[in-house]
Image: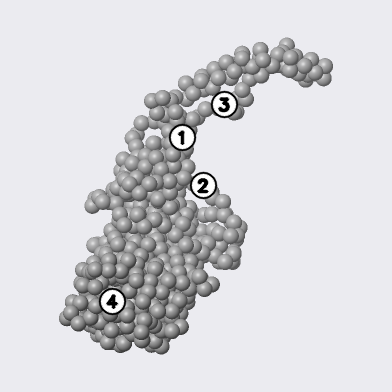
Amino acid sequence: MARIRRLEVGNFRSIQALDWAPSAGINCLVGPGDSGKSSILDAIDLCLGARRSAPFGDTDFHRLDVSQPIVIALTLGALPDTLLNLDVYGEFLRSYDAATGQIQDEPRAGTETVLTLRLTVTSDLEPAWSLYSQRAEQQGLERGLAWKERTALAPARIGSFANTNLSWSRGSVLNRLTDERANLGAELARAAREARTNFGEQAGAQLAETLRVVTETATSLGVPVGASAQALLDAHSVSIGDGAIALHNEAGVPLRSLGTGSARLLIAGLQRMAAETATIALVDEVEYGLEPHRLARLLDSLGAKDPTLPLQVFMTSHSPVAIRELSGNQVFVVRAQVGHHDICEVGLGDEVQSTLRADPEAFYAKSVIVCEGASEVGLARGLDQYWLGQGAISFFALGGAYVDVGGSNPDRCYVRGAELLRLGYRVLVLVDADKAPTPEVAAAFHSAGGQSLTWRSGRALEDELFCSLGDDAIDALLSTACEAVGRDLVESHIASKSNGQRTLGAIEAESLIDRITEATKELLGAASQIRRGGWFKSVSTYQEIARDIVGPNLATAEAGFQAIVEQLRTWTHAA
C-alpha cells in the first residue's frame, strides 16, 4: 500500500520551508528540542488524515504571518489500483525517480507513478485538500481524493490515548484488521431502550417524591407530562453506535484502561497486522510510558528489524534507548536553519554507527566533544563541574554531549567528528599529542568547520598534567593514584620506568624538601600511563581529578597548559 515519497511543508508553525524524501520504513526524528519534530508529524496527519475539517489558528502560521498560506504537500507512491485509474486521476498522476528523488509532472518509463495531495490554509483559516499537478493547475482542474480513499490512506496516530483505537470507532485500527463489520444496529437500539426502561424502574421508586412534585407543578401550569413524570435516561445520552463497542479482557475490564505503554504496544501490533490496508503510522515520543525492554518490543512491532518494511513509520524520540535499537538509516536529524529545515539521515558508516551504539545521547545535543578516550571525557566533565561551581552554566545545560572514541587511534576522533559535522552538530575533537593524526584526515575535519584541542607536542594527558601542574597538585595526583590502584602498583610502575633508580617514597620526600624536578615529573607522567595499568584510566577518576585538583590549581599551572584549558572553557561555554 501507499508510501510517502516526499514531504513538502511551508509556513507551518516553526517550519518556514521543508522538502524531505523519507525512508519507506522507519523514520525516527531526533535532534535538539523545539526543532520542529512534532510539527512534522502533525503536518503529515493534517494533510493525509481522514478529516473534512481541521482547527487552525494564527499561531499555526510561521511567525504568525497569515499573509503567507500554510502549504503541506505529500507525494504518495506504491499506489493501489484505484488511485491509478486514468479516467479518474489521469491529469494528476506524476512520476517519481527513486534514484534522483525528482518528481516530474508526466509519468514516464522507469519511474514510479505517484499522486501529490496538498493541504492549503489561508488567512480565513479554512483548510482545503486537493490533488496537485502542474498540468492540472494550468488547465484549471480541481479534484480531491474520494472519501473512501482518504479513509484508506489515513495514518494511524499512536499517541497517549488509546480509546479510539481500542473500540470500533471511525478510523480505528480494528476496522482495518479485516473486512468484518458489526451489523448490530437493531440490537444496539434495543439495548439502549432497555437501559432507559430499567433505569426508570429503579429511579422511579427512589425519586417518587420529587416526581410527584414535578407532576403537580407541571399540571398546575398546563405543561403536559401525563399522569406522572418519569426519571429515565436521556435518549441522546444513551444512544449507542459502533464506537460503543470496545475491546474488553476476559474479566470484562475495557482494554482502554490499560497503561499507556501496554496500550501503545497493543495498538502498534494491531497496526502491523492491518498493514495491508493501512501502512503509515505516526508516533510522537515513542518511548513515552515504556520501560527500555518494552520500548525495544514496540520498535520491533513497528518493523524496526524487518527487512520487508511492513509499515512506514514517522516517530519522534528523546530516548537514547530508542536510537540505540535502530540502524543509522532509520534515524534522521532535524535541523532548523535560517529560512528552512533540513533532515539528514544518520547513515550506516562505521564511525557514525559506533556513536549510535556507544553514545546515543550525542544525537540529542547541539554541541559534541569527541574525546580520544575515557580520560579526556572525565577531564572535560570534571572541569565543567568545577566551572559550574564558579558560577558558569553547565555544558549539559547548553545542549552539550561527549563521545568516547575508545583511544589508540587519533584518526578515529577526526573521522567521527567529521560525521557529526555532516549532520549539523558543532564539534570539538579533544586528543592526546603522543600520536599524530594523518594530516589529510585532520585537515578534512578542520575544513568542514570542526575545531580541535591537543596537548603540547609528544604529550599524552598524563604527561601534560604531571609536567604542567604545581607541586601541591602533583602530591594530590599521587595520593589519588595510590587510592585508585594501590600504593604497591604505583611503586612498581615508578621502579619500572626508572629502571629501578627511583622510588615513590623518594619522590614524596623530594616534594617535601625541594621543588619536584622536571625529570621527576616526566617520570611520573610515563609511569602513570603504563598500558593496561594506568593509574587514572576511568571517567569517574579523571572527573574527580579535574574537579578537585586541576581546576583549583590552574592558577599555579604552567602557562601553556592554562591556555589549552581556557580554550576548552571558551568552546564549551560558547555553546
Mark 3 lies on a secondary structure that is loop
Which callout, 1 or 2, points to the residue nearer the camera? Answer: 1
Tag 4 secondary structure: helix
Task: Assign a secondary structure to mark 2.
Answer: loop
What residue is drawn where x is 45% and y is 35%? 256
Seen in the picture, residue 131 relative to 461 is either above or below; the reply is above
Q: Nearer the viewer, mark 3 or mark 4?
A: 4
User: Which residue is painted at 37% across and 39% down in the image?
Assistant: 266
**Which of the two discs, 4 and 1, labels the residue nearer the N terminus?**
1
First along the sequence among labels 3 and 2: 2
- Decide which of tag 3 and tag 4 comes sooner along the chain: 3
Q: Position of residue 21 (x, y in %)?
A: 35, 63
Amino acid of disc 1: Ser
Q: Earlier in the sequence, mark 4 or mark 2?
A: 2
The circle drawn on residue 257 is: 1
**Numbered circle sitting on residue 238:** 3
